[in-house]
């Protein structure tokens, strides 16, 4: 692949471009679905392509393609150069310089490469079996999926950036429908890792079933202002949305409610939030980001105080500082943009049982729909539909659904008063979070 | 590479290889997609980006099993490798049915006419549109602090061959223009969003249209600066035309997709012929709507798109099928088998889904509501088809008092259950409009249209902070 990358750099030079970066990707993946203990779908995939960025006096042109033949690469380079002529120049846009040695991270586990389709199927079948066996009220497992990916990325530039690494990951997922007295409730769970041996199919299936079944009998509750406990799945969804406001891109473009608040209290005192691109068990850990900058750990919130933001090469230059290694690409066709790697929510924890025992009245939120559409990371306001379990006098009481949870992100963070001892990885953004307790949240019901 | 002259012999050979060890339906999908994206933010056109992606997928159906393989290589080696991969997954060992000789290529180029092919227009000319949009939004008021304007066009050519002998070439051009505007007054930050798009060419957007879209987005953001937190509770809700169609998309459309029906994971399963909505409600999914953003001549399985009546005067009349689910259900495919790209398995998806217009006047619907909530623009939503519970955010909302719109309201979410809400629709106006969006399902995003006229829901839960 480096031959191809060097060929692209050479072609670009021949067209008069001096600052050029090329990114290549080559990967394979497997995805399978099981339904009623039989394979429903198997997908085998191969993917490759390159993306090239040309910087011309601060104007950026980008082009990408999957055809790596000579004629296609000629066209790709011509297109990137032509696109640079259309973009507006920006004094801070420049080819990223080499950012030092790659981080000492090895996101590849050879055991996954040895996995057979038989083993993958067996694993997915056992996820579904565990869900079906967990409770007689499980009506069906609508979706049982196993997926893995194994990819290599390559980067080279005229400024001397040059590197490659290989990474892999796998996960299984179950989405369960439970039914009782004509009422249907849903629940899901995941198990993630870098090898089949890391996955726990039984607990994944069982948990998805339990999450659905415990909502059976749910009704609307009265509107009220109470403490809520966001379970790790729901907490991860909120921190995922929130993280976009913690990027320098959002700050510099006037789209962040955290702009100008560095050093200020923005959250409950016990809250710690890090972006950690080098954590050994983080699925999005990597030696370097999509611009060749080494990954690292970046504290975002510490002791409730805003510590800083995430940067790629462009936003870092604009801010007069270094990149934090958060120039992330969504594949060869995408431009790098400022995004988190692994988000880690931490701080002093309290056993979850003690948290519940200490609540006179509250709601454990186990599902939130509309976090991505109902939460506005710019204004900070959100209003989402939730399901969960009422807590009364320190005990779990009736399940609730079809109610809303609304507020604004800053007040919500400021009112974080406790963290559970149940931290776990939630995929779909790679977030490690425990249950999070928030005082005084508005529940909208009857 | 030109899909129009692709070697039919190679396609047939790949189909035969795919069926070599069993299975009962094989399909080859070859895609050539060329895209351009222009984005202006902070007054500056950022990295202009374009690219071309080629790829091929082979799908094999064996009973209820689906085997799928794809590759970026569209030559013989790539196609045969994908065909061999799906064949290897079949366990029966017996050969599948003979591959019917592929007929002449079918295509329907005039179905969604393209007056000005976007690839014939210089990128610099397209840049003028985003600049015009930026200018219009910024001139809307001093409170505008950020403007993001996007222009994108795509030409996607797909060639679909299957073991039934179908050979279809669909040539799709889509163009879209979007504006997102942020307004700020003191600590209050509000956003406005507007878009125009279609299965059409560059003729869809000129400077005047670009300015109009951006000014509308700016107007929404500014109007919401005066907003106060929305109330909490159940009340009559009037949904405006256009974006209000998201309600039907979420509350009903997803539940009519035949994969959810087949698994009993939809509240609409088993309810054909039953009353699921108020008698004034009729609704359609129409993938053939001329130049519609969600339209194509053929779906991604080579089935011609069509207009499907899904609710007739309150009664459920149909589901949205792809080939696989239609075959299982003994129904005819409805042209709803769609995929994001060759990297995705086709599944039942909506195209342009809408509630048919009624005969009331929009102003009368509001005037007939003494107290309620008016949702002018929706931000997007989500549904669990199994329970029918849905939620969506309101981007622009107002209080209705004494039959008139009064205070702008922010932070509102509408929550409800599909059939329950459809049954409570009690007024529908005639101001029909379709808006464009990208709908996500199973990790696949496809262009869809959502539409409706202004309508009223007698009672619905509004979740606000006030």
Image: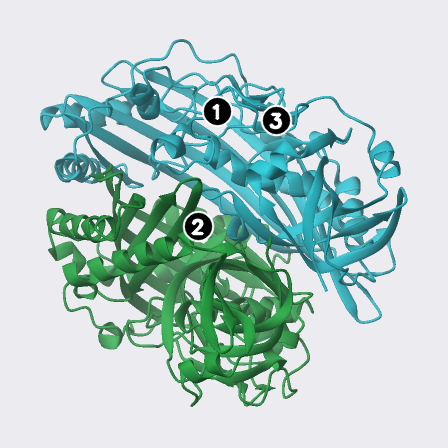
Gap between marks 3 and 1, in whole Å?
23 Å
Check the residue under mark 3 and report the chain it is in. Answer: A
Q: Tell me which chain appears green.
A: B
Q: Secondary structure at mark 2?
A: loop
**Residue A442, how many percent across, how many down?**
67, 50
Chain displayed in cyan: A
- Graded by Cα atoms within 10 Å as few (under 14), some (14 to 19) or many (20 or more), the crowding at tag 3 reads many
In this rendered view, identify the residue nearer to me: A325 or A303.
Answer: A303
The residue carrying pointer 2 sits among few (fewer than 14), some (14 to 19) or many (20 or more) residues within 10 Å by Cα, namely many
Drawn side of residue A136 relative to residue B361, left or right: right
Asked whether residue A119 appears in the rendered view, the answer is: no
The mark nearer the N terminus, 3 or 1, is 1
Q: Find disc 3 in the rendering and name its residue.
A: A344
Please give the residue where the numbered disc 2 appears in the rendered image: B343
What is the chain letter for disc 1? A
Can marks 3 and 1 be said to lie on one chain? yes
Q: Is residue B204 left or right of residue A262?
A: left
Which residue in the protein does label 1 denote? A166
Quick one: SS at disc 3? strand
Q: Residue furthest top?
A: A101
Q: Chain of mark 2?
A: B
């Amino acid at each position: 692949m480096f031959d191809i990358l060097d060929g692209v750099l050479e072609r670009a030079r021949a067209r008069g471009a001096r600052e050029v970066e090329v990114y290549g990707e080559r990967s394979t993946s497997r995805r399978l679905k099981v339904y009623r203990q039989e394979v429903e779908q198997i997908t085998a995939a191969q993917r490759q392509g390159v993306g090239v960025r040309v910087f011309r006096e601060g104007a950026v042109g980008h082009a990408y393609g999957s055809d790596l033949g000579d004629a296609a690469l000629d066209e790709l380079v011509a297109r990137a150069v032509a696109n640079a002529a259309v973009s507006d120049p920006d004094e801070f846009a420049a080819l990223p310089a080499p950012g030092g040695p790659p981080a000492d991270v090895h996101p590849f586990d050879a055991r996954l490469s040895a996995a057979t389709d038989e083993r993958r199927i067996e694993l997915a079948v056992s996820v579904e079996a565990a869900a079906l066996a967990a409770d007689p009220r499980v009506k069906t497992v609508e979706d049982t999926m196993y997926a893995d990916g194994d990819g290599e990325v390559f980067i080279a530039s005229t400024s001397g950036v040059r590197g490659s690494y290989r990474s892999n990951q796998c996960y299984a997922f179950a989405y369960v429908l439970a039914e009782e007295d004509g009422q249907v409730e849903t629940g899901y769970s995941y198990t993630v890792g870098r090898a089949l041996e890391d996955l726990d199919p039984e607990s994944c299936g069982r948990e998805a079933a339990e999450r659905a079944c415990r909502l059976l009998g749910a009704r609307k509750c009265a509107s009220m202002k109470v403490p809520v406990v966001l379970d790790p799945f729901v907490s991860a969804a909120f921190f995922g949305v929130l993280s976009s406001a913690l990027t320098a891109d959002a700050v510099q473009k006037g789209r962040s409610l955290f702009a100008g608040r560095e050093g200020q209290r923005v959250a409950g005192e016990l809250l710690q939030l890090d972006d950690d691109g080098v954590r050994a068990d983080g699925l999005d850990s990597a030696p370097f980001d999509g611009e060749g900058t080494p990954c690292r750990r970046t504290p975002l919130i510490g002791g409730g105080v805003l510590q800083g933001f995430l940067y790629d090469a462009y936003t870092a230059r604009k801010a007069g500082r270094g990149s934090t290694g958060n120039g992330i690409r969504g594949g060869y066709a995408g431009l790098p943009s400022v995004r988190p790697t692994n988000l880690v929510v931490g701080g002093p924890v309290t056993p979850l049982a003690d948290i519940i025992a200490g609540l006179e009245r509250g709601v454990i939120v186990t599902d939130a729909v509309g976090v991505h559409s109902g939460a506005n990371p710019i204004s900070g306001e959100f209003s989402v539909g939730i399901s969960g379990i009422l807590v009364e006098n320190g005990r779990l009481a009736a399940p609730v659904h079809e109610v809303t949870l609304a507020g604004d992100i800053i007040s919500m963070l400021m009112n974080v008063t406790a963290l559970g001892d149940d931290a776990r990885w939630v995929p779909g953004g790679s977030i490690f979070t425990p249950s999070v307790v928030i005082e005084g949240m508005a529940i909208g019901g009857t | 590479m030109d899909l129009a002259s692709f070697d039919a012999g190679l396609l047939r050979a790949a189909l035969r290889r795919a069926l070599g060890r069993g299975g009962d339906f094989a399909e080859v999908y070859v895609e050539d997609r060329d895209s351009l994206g222009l984005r202006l933010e902070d007054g500056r056109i950022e990295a202009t980006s374009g690219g071309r992606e080629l790829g091929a997928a082979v799908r094999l159906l064996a009973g209820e099993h689906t085997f799928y393989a794809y590759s970026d290589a569209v030559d013989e080696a790539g196609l045969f490798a994908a065909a061999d991969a799906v064949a290897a997954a079949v366990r029966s060992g017996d050969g599948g049915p003979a591959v019917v000789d592929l007929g002449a290529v079918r295509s329907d180029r005039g179905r969604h006419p393209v007056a000005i092919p976007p690839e014939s227009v210089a990128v610099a000319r397209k840049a003028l549109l985003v600049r015009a949009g930026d200018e219009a939004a910024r001139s809307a008021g001093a409170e505008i602090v950020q403007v993001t304007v996007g222009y994108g066009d795509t030409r996607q050519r797909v060639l679909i061959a299957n073991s039934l002998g179908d050979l279809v070439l669909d040539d799709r051009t889509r163009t879209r223009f979007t504006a997102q505007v942020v307004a700020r007054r003191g600590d209050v930050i509000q956003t406005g969003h507007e878009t125009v798009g279609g299965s059409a060419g560059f003729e869809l957007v000129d400077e005047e249209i670009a300015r109009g879209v951006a000014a509308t987005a700016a107007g929404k953001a500014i109007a919401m600066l005066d907003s106060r937190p929305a109330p909490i509770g159940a009340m009559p809700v009037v949904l405006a035309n256009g974006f209000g169609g998201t309600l039907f998309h979420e509350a009903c459309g997803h539940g009519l997709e035949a994969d959810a029906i087949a698994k009993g994971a939809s509240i609409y399963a088993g309810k054909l012929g039953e009353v699921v909505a108020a008698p004034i409600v009729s609704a359609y999914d129409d993938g053939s709507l001329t130049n519609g953003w969600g339209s194509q001549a053929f779906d991604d399985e080579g089935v011609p798109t069509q207009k499907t009546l899904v609710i007739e005067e309150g009664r459920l009349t149909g589901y949205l099928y792809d080939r696989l689910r239609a075959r299982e259900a003994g129904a005819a495919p409805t042209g709803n088998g769609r995929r994001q790209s060759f990297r995705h398995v086709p599944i039942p998806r909506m195209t342009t889904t809408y509630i048919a217009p009624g005969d009331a006047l929009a102003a009368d619907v509001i005037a007939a509501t003494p107290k309620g909530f008016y949702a002018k623009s929706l931000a997007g939503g989500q549904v669990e088809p199994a329970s029918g519970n849905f939620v969506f955010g309101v981007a622009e909302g107002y209080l209705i008092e004494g039959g008139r719109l009064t205070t702008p309201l922010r932070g509102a979410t509408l929550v409800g259950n599909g059939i329950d809400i459809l049954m409570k629709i009690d007024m529908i106006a005639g101001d029909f409009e379709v808006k464009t969006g990208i709908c996500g399902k199973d990790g696949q995003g496809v262009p869809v249209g959502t539409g409706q006229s202004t309508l009223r829901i007698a009672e619905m839960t509004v979740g606000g902070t006030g």
